[in-house]
Amino acid sequence: MAKHPLPTIDPGRSEFGLARTVCDCTDCVLNCRFLPGYLVPADLSRIGEHLAPDEDLLAWSREHLLASPGAQVMRDDRVFRIRTLVPARREDGACRFLTAADRCAIHPVAPFGCAFFDTHQTREDSDARSKLGLQAVLEAWQSGDTYAQVWAMLAEAGRVAPPPEVCRAQMRWADDPS
Ligand code: SF4
């Protein structure tokens, strides 16, 4: 018997040819509490325009986003990080967009790292999806895209997120303190 209701597919939103998944089970919401998903470059203006269409993107980002040191990846036997933008946190460490009812306040435009992942996917599926997202972020860095400029501005202002491996360890402990 399945432990949780299975995620549903939302064909109304796609990225890199993938359809988003939708799930609000306890395990998926745990990510919102400890490891909010990263933005891909297309998310930046999409979320900004959804929340504050008349606000300057840099000013908006400073309030709502953090610079994360990003995921560790290996290429050509070399380990390095791809720096990402992630949602800012509440005082308790949870994503600032997580509502009191444990729902996503920006669900229609949730970041790629949230909207296209759920805890029911296979490791292979989530790794393949993440590879596409991180490649887009890497290209944004290589081209000096607004994404990279916003990250640098946030880092300079000290608006930084903990490394994902630290968030993941905290999440594992919260899920199973034994
Ligand atoms: S943006 Fe939404 S889905 Fe993503 S971590 Fe925050 S509350 Fe969760």
Image (cartoon, rainbow, N blue to C red):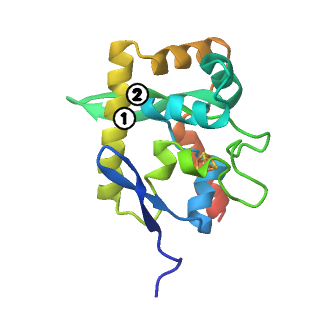
Picture quadrant of residue 175: bottom right
Picture quadrant of residue 66: top right
Residue in the foreground of this view, choosing between 136 and 70: 136
From the image, tell me which residue sits under label 1.
Answer: 134
The kind of residue on which mark 1 rests is: Leu
71 relative position to 76: left or right = right
Query: How many residues crowd around disc 1 within 10 Å: few (fewer than 14), some, or many (20 or more)?
Result: many
Residue 172: numbered disc: none
Please provide percent x and percent y for residue 113.
47, 44
Residue in the foreground of this view, choosing between 144 and 75: 144
Quadrant where the C terminus is found in the figure: bottom right
Q: Residue at x 56, y 50 (%)?
A: 108
Picture quadrant of residue 102: bottom right
Residue 82: numbered disc: 2
The kind of residue on which mark 2 rests is: Ile
Residue in the foreground of this view, choosing between 40 and 42: 42
Q: Residue at x 65, y 18 (%)?
A: 56
- Distance from mark 1 CB to nearest ligand 1 atom below 8 Å: no
Q: Is residue 133 above or below residue 81?
A: below
Please provide percent x and percent y for residue 15.
36, 45
Mark 2 lies on a secondary structure that is strand
Q: Are marks 1 and 2 in contact (CB under 8 Å)?
A: yes
Question: Which of the two discs, 1 and 2, labels the residue nearer the N terminus?
Answer: 2
Query: How many residues crowd around disc 2 within 10 Å: few (fewer than 14), some, or many (20 or more)?
Result: some
Q: Is residue 153 above or below residue 168?
A: above
